[in-house]
Each structure stands twice: as C-alpha cells, then as structure tokens.
Amino acid sequence: MRPRRAIFFDVDGVLLDSLSLHLKICEDLSRQYGLGLSIPTPAQFKELARTGIRVSPMKDFFMAVGFGESDAERADAYYREHFMEEYAPSPFSHVAEVLSTLHKAGFVLGIVTANVRANVEKALGKSWELFDPRLCYTYDHVPSLTKPEALEAGAEQLGVAPEDVIFVGDQVTDRDAAQAAGVRFLGVTYGWGISLEDTGFETVQDRWELGVRLLQMAPPTDEQLKVGLEHGRGMYIYHADQRHRSLNFYFTLAAALSGGLGAIFTSEKIWVIAYPIAPFLASGFAVIVVAVMDFFARLDARNAELVECDKKLLECVEAELGKRSGLSEEFRIIRRGNKFAEKNRCGTYKHLVPVILRVFKIAALIALVTSWAYWTWVQQHSTH
C-alpha cells in the first residue's frame, strides 16, 4: 500500500473560526437592506446545515438564512469586497501547530473550499505558506470545478490514486464530495454542520485530535512516526502536567472551603450574631462545597481521559517505531512511566482522586444536616 501523503482541507469551520462572523454579516446586511430577517444562531445554523441544505458558496449561504436570490447576489458581492476588512475571521486555536506538524511529517497539504483565495490567504497568515500552491482550489481560482472534481484534479496533479488522499471537512456535503471523488474523509464536529450524532464516517472533536487522527489515518513513514511521537509526547506531558496542577488547585480550594465550613459550625459568635439566618448561611455554604466538588470530580475525569488517550496513542506509535527502527528502552516514556508507577505503588492514584473529592462532598452534606439539627436544638432551648 502506498503511503497517503496528501491532505486537503475545507477552510471555514475546519481551519477558520468564522461561522459567527458569517452570521453577523447576514444580520448586518438584512438590516441594511430592510429585509427584517431572523438570522439563526450558530447552533441553529448547524442544525440547518445538517439537513443537507446548500450553504456554500456564499450566495447559497445568504439564501439558506432567508435572503432572496437577488438580495443574495448583492450581498455576495458585498461579502467579497468587505468581509475580510470588516469582520476578519481568524484560525481556530492550534491550527497553525497542527498544519506545521503535518507539513514536517512529509504530507502535501491542499485546500478545497467555496471561499475565495484572498480571504483564505489573509486569514491563515503564515500557515498559507505550508500549502502546495498547485493544490489550492478556491471558488475564484477554479470556479468551474465542483469539490469532487477539485479533489480528483489534486490527486491527478500529485500522481497518486484518489484513495491515497484524505479530505477534511465539516459538513455532510463534504463527506459526499469525498465519496464522489473516491478519497478518504475525516469530519470535524467543531465546525458548521457535523455533530457527534453523525455516523458512517470518522470524526474528531478538536484540533489536537485532528492532527493525531490524520497521522494515524495515513500509513506512516519512519519520519512521520518520529514526528508523531514528538507531537504525542508533547500532548502527553502537557495534559499530565495540567491534570497535576489542576489537582493541586482542587485540593487546596477544597481544603479552604472545608475549613470555612468548619469555622462556621464551630464559631459560636457567628451563630449568635447571625442567629435567624445562620442555618441558611451554613446550608448555602455546604451546597456550594458539594457543587464545587462535583464539578472538580467531573473535570478531573475528563482530564484523566485525555491523559489516558495520549498514553494509548503514544504506546501505538512507540510500538510501531520500535518494530521498525529498534526504539531503545530508555526512550519509551510510557513503559518507563508504567514501571515507575508500579515501583512506587501509584497504580491506584486515578481511583484515589474521586474518593477524596467524594469525602469532601459527604463531609459537606453531614455538616448541612448537623447545622439544621443544631439550629433546631437552639430554638428548642431558647424557648425555655
């Protein structure tokens, strides 16, 4: 099997965070033209796009939100001339790093979009230089080509079979274009039209996962594996460090809240001064502690999943690279990490965190019940 070395990207909703700005220009032009349209929110528009309605090129976008054809043509002309200057969309976070990683790994990068070249080039900035100029199919560059035809032309230009090409998009129509061209498709759920509910094709939820998944989809060369290993190590160390720092913060804040709760229950002055509302204050404080601990538990579970995901990806890359080039034991950070955990009996650490947070929650609930019991006791004795 030949390595897949070509990746084509749709732009809006994949590389550029531009949906809210496109809806904003629709709202502004609707007001300017006196149309009185109710422009959908980003969430509503995503549901609209998932129905299969055409939302590109831009004339179709205007018509999808309610513009008549003549107004859509007028709005499209205004869009081409003023959108970048007045609205200026920017890339999603981490897009530059992902594109750089893929470029260093030896992939040829291309663009297939219904946007115009001037908008794309200006918005991507230096990242534009990572794309092969022969493979940038924008609406104004080759307006006669459909997306499937552009993907086929790109594969022919590179001299590779269509099945050795990957297309990244954010709408079901992008998936359809990939199928028509015979190329592989990867959908992103953070864009304009694809959600986690869509099945039948592979999807990713964020840009870091996008980079890793693209490296996985292509049969990797040794150089790509090494770049992927470096990329994965960075993610693993970053997420593990973030979890460690987060836990330190969680436990510090939990201790402070518990200390404050204890101070309320043990300070007679507070109960005397705030006698009529003391139990309500204590109850409110206890509820806050419970809510915060529950939030921390869910957040730590998410962080733990990220670290575990990074670990599994690194294990795969290290195993494959080890088979090919004999990756030495001292560089296998996952294996060394596991041995360190076993040696120091830290294997139950991931189970200890939710237990500790649960103890704080239980303590707060006990304090809540105790506060009301104490208040009742005070009331009974104050009447005698």
Image (tube, helix red, strand yellow):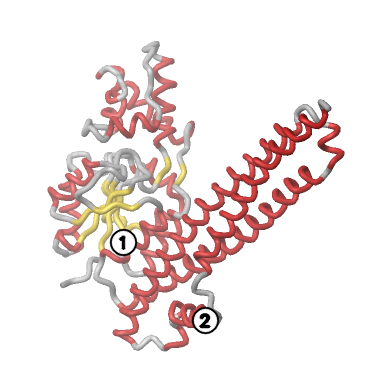
Q: On the rendered structure, is 257 left or right of 270? A: left
Residue 136, visible in the rendered structure: no
Q: Which quadrant of the rendered structure holds the C terminus?
A: top right
- Residue 349 percent coordinates (x, y): 53, 69
Residue nearest the observer in this picture, 252 or 225: 252
Q: Which residue is mark 2?
A: 340
User: Is there any visible trace of residue 173 in the rendered image?
Assistant: yes
Badge 2: few (under 14), some or many (20 or more) residues near its Cα, within 10 Å?
A: few
Query: Does dot 1 land on a helix, a strand or a loop?
Result: helix
Foreground disc of the pair 1, 2: 2
Residue 308's place in the image compared with 18, above or below, is below
The spot of residue 26 in percent (x, y) is: 39, 24
Alpha carbon distance from label 1 to label 2: 31 Å
Q: Nearer the viewer, residue 135 or 46?
A: 46
Identity of the residue drawn at 77% across and 29% down: 379
* Place of residue 67 in the rendered image (x, y in percent of width and height, measured from the top left): 30, 19
- Tell me the kind of residue under disc 2: Phe
Task: Tell me, for residue 335, which label it has, or none.
Answer: none
Residue 90 vs 242, above or below: the answer is: above
Percent of width and height locating residue 210: 36, 56
- The residue lying at 24 percent from left, 57 percent from top is 166
Q: Amino acid at mark 1?
A: Leu
Instruction: Say if mark 1 contacts mark 2, CB within 8 Å.
Output: no
Q: How many marks?
A: 2
SS label for mark 2: helix
Q: Determine the residue positioned at 34% across, 30% down.
A: 45
Say left or right for 323 vs 95. Answer: left
Which of the 4 image quarters holds residue 183?
Answer: bottom left
Mark 1 highlights which residue? 214
